[in-house]
Image (cartoon, rainbow, N blue to C red):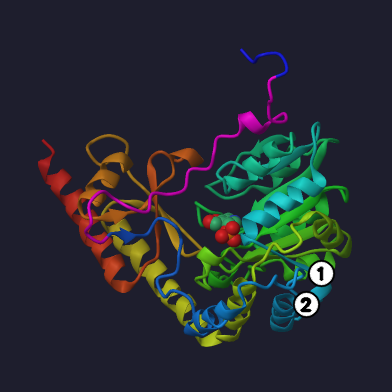
Amino acid sequence: MTAKGALRPRQGILDIAPYVPAKSALEGSEPVIKLSHNETPFGPSPRAVEAYLAEAPHLSRYPDGSARALREAVAKLYGLDPARIVCGTGSDELLALLAAAYLGPGDEAIYSEHAFLVYRIVILARGATPVVAPETALTADVDAILARVTPSTRMVFLANPNNPTGTYLSFDEVKRLRASLPDSVLLVVDAAYAEYVRANDYEAGIELVATARNTVMTRTFSKIHGLAALRIGWAYCPDAVADALNRIRGPFNVSGPAIAAGMAALQDRAHEKRSAEHNEIWLGRLAEALSGLGLTVTPSAANFLLVHFPKGNGHSATEADKFLHSRRIVLRRVGDYGLPDALRMTVGSEADNRAVLDALAAFMGAKASARP
Ligand SMILES: Cc1ncc(COP(=O)(O)O)c(C=O)c1O
């Protein structure tokens, strides 16, 4: 019971299940193969590291609060208007700011069944109501989303591609979603993995934001640019949305070293290209090899794969996870995403990918031959 007058957080906050990050370490001091966070195996560009280190003598200075140089670098690369870009401490912060600006008690926000968990958190944090739309074949379903729109709907969050499924919606489908949503609904297209996508029918959101109303695209430096620790993301927004976000964000939300490293990372096109090519090759190789072991793999457009294990029979995801730990390998359990029979594997270095394949071959083989 709450004592009279006791301090309580606002409505919705205590309904939030705190985000539990993927495991990144195991007991013991031996090295771990960590493919649980969708990080790049190439690390950041050396130019980004150099730019970061060059900021060390200036740590007593506040950064430019508007991150103008970084916005201009992003705008130049993608042909955007820098005034419509807002930078944040990771795209997570931008998702939270969007919810803060547009959601309150009584409002509804929709996301799909196995969508990135942060959407639910930022919706509940504003006292609004999360509405879950079922997916088809582990992919966001535009009709299911539209069927859940009510007069109270204020936002739709769409991860494209989605984490942890790796599936994506074509540009046509995203356009159809936008065109069928009321103008008063803000569509947030979270394109954290856009740089990895090779599909011809994919569009990250730049064209959509340019041509549609009330649509925002969020992007991150945490994935292909390898700067997850620095926490840098950006959103491309309509003017009015950028204005709202700029009113409520922390005045110096992106740090000086992050601005410098982000700018340098954008310039190293060769580094990005190499990462994307490696990813494309290994997505295919891993999917084929894992299928060859009798596992089901959801086709992925991102830098990770969702691997489905059979229930029971000694081959479950829980047992696979335990077996992998015995080989010092950590993948992502995804029970909290409603996928208890799957593990999410980030595409790693060639050596790490091979280590996972060897381990899973041993796991499946050993268990198979141990079967009666
Ligand atoms: C779909 C999606 N969106 C956003 C993020 C957040 O990225 P960051 O806050 O590091 O920019 C992630 C990170 O895993 C993600 O998977």
Q: Which mark is residue 318?
A: none
Dominant secondary structure, magenta: loop
Spatial CA span between label 1 and label 2: 8 Å
Question: Is the residue at mark 2 in contact range of ligand 1, meaning its CB lies under 8 Å from it?
Answer: no
Mark 2 is on which residue type?
A: Leu
Q: Is residue 167 visible?
A: no
x 58%, y 69%: residue: 221
Local SS, label 2: loop
Q: The C terminus is located in which quarter?
A: top left
Please report the bounds of the magenta region as a residue range.
6-31
Check the image and report above or below for 167 versus 312: below
Q: Badge 1: how crowded within 10 Å, few (<14), some, or many (20+)?
A: some
Residue 152 as seen in the image, left or right of residue 29: right
Local SS, label 1: helix
Check the image and report above or below for 118 versus 239: above
Question: Is the residue at mark 1 in contact range of ligand 1, meaning its CB lies under 8 Å from it?
Answer: no
Q: Is residue 58 visible?
A: yes
x 25%, y 44%: residue: 322
Where on the picture, by quarter, is residue 347? bottom left
Check the image and report above or below for 131 versus 243: above
Q: Are marks 1 and 2 in contact (CB under 8 Å)?
A: yes
Give the foreground label among 1 and 2.
1
Mark 1 is on which residue type?
A: Arg
Q: Is residue 159 magenta?
A: no
Q: Is residue 24 magenta?
A: yes
Q: The N terminus is located in which quarter?
A: top right
x 72%, y 64%: residue: 252
Quadrant observed for ligand 1 in the rendered image: bottom right
Q: Which residue bears the numbered disc 2?
A: 80
Q: Where's residue 243, x and y in %?
A: 86, 61
Q: Nearer the viewer, residue 308 or 344?
A: 344
Q: Which residue bears the numbered disc 1?
A: 84
